[in-house]
Amino acid sequence: MLIRSRLMRACALTTVIFAIAAIAACALLDATSIAAEGTAVAVPANDSVKAPATGATRATRPARGDMQRIRPEYNDAYINNPHKGTTTFQRFNGDPLYPTMRWDDSKGPLEFPAPKNADLSNDNYPPTRISYCRWAWKVIEPEKGKIRFDVLDAALKTAHDRGQTLQMRMQPWVGPEDAPDWYYAMGGTRQGGPTTRPSVPSAPAGVLAPPGATPTSAPAPTTTRARRPRFQETDFNNPLYLQHWGDFIRALGKRYDGHPDLESFDVAYAGQFGEEGGNATYETASKLVDVYREAFQKTDLLLMLGTPGCKYASTLKDRHFGWRADCFGDLRMGRDQSTPRNLSWNHSYDAYPQQVAETIAPDAWRYAPVTYETCGTVSSWKRSNYDIDWIIEQGSKYHISVFMPKSVVIPEEWMGKIMEFNKRMGYRFFIQQMYLPEDARPGQLIETVVTIDNKGCAPIYRPYHFALRFSQGEKSYVVKLKQDIRTWMPDLSFFREKFIYPPELEIGKEVKVSCAIVNDQDQPVVKLAIKPLAVDGWHELARMGASETDSRPID
C-alpha cells in the first residue's frame, strides 16, 4: 500500500508539472504572436539565395502596415508573345497557306505582296510572332559576291511589319537548285559517288543496328545510306567550298548579326536543305561551324540535330548554340524489317533521344532555343492516326520554344490541342507573389521580393528587363531591375532586389505601380499571364504612397 500511495503521488505531481509547462508555453507563444505577428514569412528560395547559417532562408517584413503582399490572378488565355510558338513558313502573317498538303522547301519568298488578310490573321492556322524562311545559295548569291541583300532586307522588313521576327536559313543545295554555277566554274567539284543522306542512327559496337545502320566509332552518331541521285552532290570537303560558302556566311553575318528582327540563323553548313551535313567530314564540319560562330556573335545560332557539326559544337565552351530537328512527330511504323514489324525505326523513338544525348551539349536548352519542324504536316499526322497528345508531350520534354508546321492547314479538330501546345512552348511568366512597401519616401532605397512561376517549358533567351512603372496622373517613371530574366527556368524562380523609389514622385499623392517586361527603350515587349491581360503591356499590381518618411526595410 505504501508503494502504491507513493506512485500515485508521483503521477499527480508529474501531471501538475506538465500542466504548468503547457500553460507557460501557450502564454509565451501568445506573447510572441502579439509582439511579432507577421514578422517572418517563409518564401521559396533557389541556389542563388544564401541561407543564414542558423537555418533556411526566410523573407521577413516589418510590422503590418509597412509592407504589402501582391498575389495577381493567373490568366490561362493564350498570349501571342514574341520569340516562341508556331511559325509561318516561306510566308508571313496574313498570307494564304499552301493550298494543298504539299509545301516547298526550295522557294523562299522573292517578292512581298500585300497580305491577303488585312488584319494579319491566318486562316486555319495559329496566330504567330515568327516567320521562317529559307533560300537556296544559288538564288541568293547568283554571282560571286553579288548577294541579294534586297530580298533578305525585304523579308526582314515584311516580318517586322507583320508583327513577326524572322528565322533564316541558307541552303547549300535543295531539290533542283544545285550549288551556284559560278562555284563550279571556279573549281568547285561534286562528290564522286551517289548522293548520301545521314538518316539512320548508327549503333554502338556490339549493338544490333536497325536496317541500313552500321556500328561506328566516328564522332557523329549517324551514318549514311545511298539513294538514287538526280545529280552528284557537291563535294563539301573541297577547300574551295569552305572558302566560298564561308565568304557567303561572313557577308550575311556582317550585315545581319544582331538585327532586332532576326530571330535566329540556322547552321545549315552542308547537305541537301543544309539539314543533314551531306558528305562533309567531322573536320570539315568543324571548320564550317566556326565560320558561323565567328560571323554571328549576337544572333542565336541553331544547329542541325545529329550532324557532325552539331557534335563538334557541343564541345565548345565559348558559345551556346540552340538546335532544330526537322521531322518532329514522326511515328511511322512497318517501314523496314524490324522485329516486331510494327515497331520499326522512326525519329521519335530512335533518332531524337540518341542524337540529343550524343550531339547536344547538356542543358543546351537553358541558353539557346529549340525548334521543331513537323515530319510531314499536322494534317498528315491526323491522316496517319498519330497520337498528337503523345507528340506534344515529347515536344515539351525537349523544351521546345518554336514549332514550324509548314504553313499547311491545321485540322479543325486538332486546333485546340495545337493552341494548348503553343501555350506550353517556350516561356510563360506569372508573378506568384511580390512584396512592395505600402509607402516610401521618394528617393529612398527600397526593396521588392518576387517569386516568378514560369509555366512554360523553356526560358526566354532575349536580354529583356523586368521593370516597374510608378505613375502619378499623367507622369510615369520606369525602373528597370537588374534581375536577368533569362534565368527564369520552368517552375519557380525567386529574387529580391533593391532600387531607388523615383525621387520625382510628388509627396502626398497616390502612386500606381505596374510591371512589364521591356526592351532597352522601356517599351513593353512581353506580356505576363496576369488577369486582366494588359492592353499596353503594363500590368497594374498595387498602389503605394509617397511620404516624407522612409518605409521600413525587409530584413
Image (spheres, helix red, strand yellow):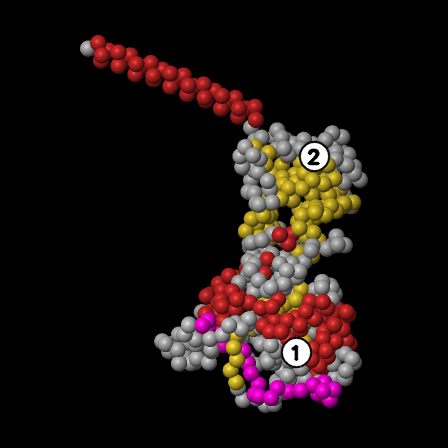
**Residue 270 shown in magenta:** no
What residue range appears in magenta?
182-205
Vertical order, 132 against 508 (above or below): below
**Residue 196 shown in magenta:** yes
Q: Are marks 1 and 2 in contact (CB under 8 Å)?
A: no
Whether residue 246 sits left or right of residue 193 in the image: it is: right
Query: In the rendered view of the protein, which quadrant contains the C terminus?
Result: top right
Q: Earlier in the sequence, mark 1 or mark 2?
A: 1
Viewer-closest of 141 and 390: 141
Which x, y percent locates residue 248?
A: 73, 76
Q: Secondary structure at mark 2?
A: strand
Q: Is residue 322 visible?
A: no
Of the numbered discs in the image, which one, if any, rests on residue 439? 2
Of the numbered discs in the image, which one, if any, rests on residue 171? 1
Which x, y percent locates residue 335?
A: 43, 80
Which x, y percent locates residue 378?
A: 52, 73
Which x, y percent locates residue 420?
A: 53, 62
Of the numbered discs in the image, which one, if any, rests on residue 133? none
Whether residue 139 sits left or right of residue 23 in the image: it is: right
Viewer-closest of 146 and 259: 146
Q: Secondary structure at mark 1?
A: strand
How far separated are the C-alphas under marks 1 and 2? 59 Å
Residue positioned 60% across, 45% down in the render: 48
Vertical order, 298 against 56 (above or below): below
